[in-house]
Amino acid sequence: AGGGKRKPLEFVQLNVSGLPCQVIGEASVVAAYLGMVKDESNKVKKPQECWMRFPDGTVKKLLRSRLLPLPTQLPRLNDWAVVVDLHGELERYNGFRGLCGLNAGQDAFWVLFEPNAGGNKSPKPPLEMIPRKNLVALPTSPHGALETQWEAKLRALPSIGHLVDDPGQPGQLEALKDKDDEENEDEEAFTEEEGEEERPEVGDLVTLLPDNKQMGILKALEGTRAEVKLLPSMAPDSLFAPRVDGCALSLLTKSTQEEAEEVALCNICDEANPEEELLICDNFCKSCASTIHIKCLDPPLQKVPEGDWFCPVCLPREKRKAKAKAEPKSKAEAKMKAKAKAKVKPAAKAKTKAKAVKASIAKLGKA
């Protein structure tokens, strides 16, 4: 923006979804950043943790201090590249790598992904057209060179001089070791707490990573794979009917209706405030995920309605339920009236017969 030069990704803060990072302490492990781990109030947890996608597709939490963003470059034809900062329908490919194939115009590549990319269930690898600006490649050595351009730059840096013996160095090293031990203990304690996180079971309300906005009901579990009935909402890109999707169990977080209501955002403006004007459907977390401000409705409302409120997703179904309940009641009332009439008729016949008998007796008396 403003004609300025774009800042290289290796020098920016870790806030680009899909950015490849080196996992410190594991030299051969490269994972893709997906987002910060947040608590129920949507605040970043401390110590800071990140959701990371590994090459096999699994998503795990890692301490931010263990991640080193890697230098990247624009991909070329036949390069392996990682997808970054995609939004919308193709967002599920962030952090997955693919092979840049045919050019799709000047600004995009046809990218052939590995079979497990983006939640793909088919054995056939997915093929998608990805904009060049959303693809990054790790630097490789030029043809015939023994080092990458980044290694060459590092070697060209001025020398820091020769190391000399320092009498105070052993004490400094011991202090650093004690500090590292304390940090490792904190990390181990946090990992133990993380391991105690409750695993969702069939029938539980769950939210889906990376942003925990999409909600659903867990319908089936098979190993590390899960089937979730996604709950529709009033969001523009949401379907008006539940659908079942398959995903990795590691992408699911168990939730409750109370927790979901506490962090609920408007489906339209994606904000909570003003909370006193935020409508929550009476079927929230059961058959929908609809929450909306009265001003975001079309047409908008002037005040919060009294009594039950059902969103446009649920209203037709609720009307059908009310009609179905009313019909048996009407039939029952009609049946009761018919029985009452049936009881009246025999009584009337008996009364008429009694009159006839009295008339006959009177005639005999006169005779």
Image: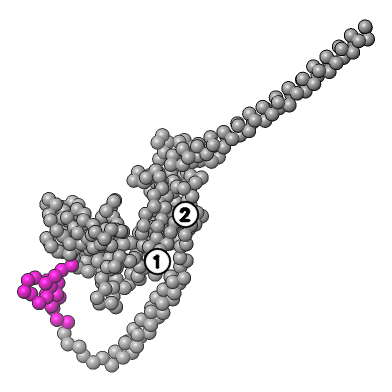
Instruction: Tell me which label, 2 or 1, sits earlier in the chain.
Output: 1
Q: Amino acid at mark 1?
A: Gly
Q: Residue at x 38, y 79 (%)?
A: 184
Q: Which residues are magenta?
A: 137-160
Q: Rate crowding at label 1 as few (under 14), some (14 to 19) or many (20 or more) other CA atoms within 10 Å.
A: few
| Residue that sits furthest to the left in the current view | 144
* Relative image position of residue 304 (x, y in whole percent): 50, 39
The local secondary structure at tag 2 comes to: helix
Q: Residue at x 28, y 62 (%)?
A: 116
Residue at point 36%, 59% (across, down): 247
Main secondary structure of the magenta stretch: loop
Q: Residue 223 has which mark?
A: 1
Q: Is residue 336 magenta?
A: no
**Residue bearing the label numbered 2:** 260
Q: Nearer the viewer, residue 41 or 130?
A: 130
Viewer can see residue 41: no
Residue 261 higher or lower than 59, as above or below: above
State left or right for residue 330 relative to residue 56.
right
In the image, which disc is placed on residue 206? none
- Count how many numbered circles sit on residues in the image: 2
Residue 245: percent from left, percent from top: 37, 54
- Amino acid on which the number 2 mark rests in the picture: Ala
> Is residue 98 in sight in this rendering?
yes
Residue 53 screen position, x and y as percent: 30, 65
- State how far apart marks 2 and 1 are (Cα): 26 Å
Where disc 1 sits, the SS reads: loop
On-image quarter of the C terminus: top right
Which sits in the foreground, 93 or 294? 93
On the image, which quarter does residue 73 sit in?
Answer: bottom left
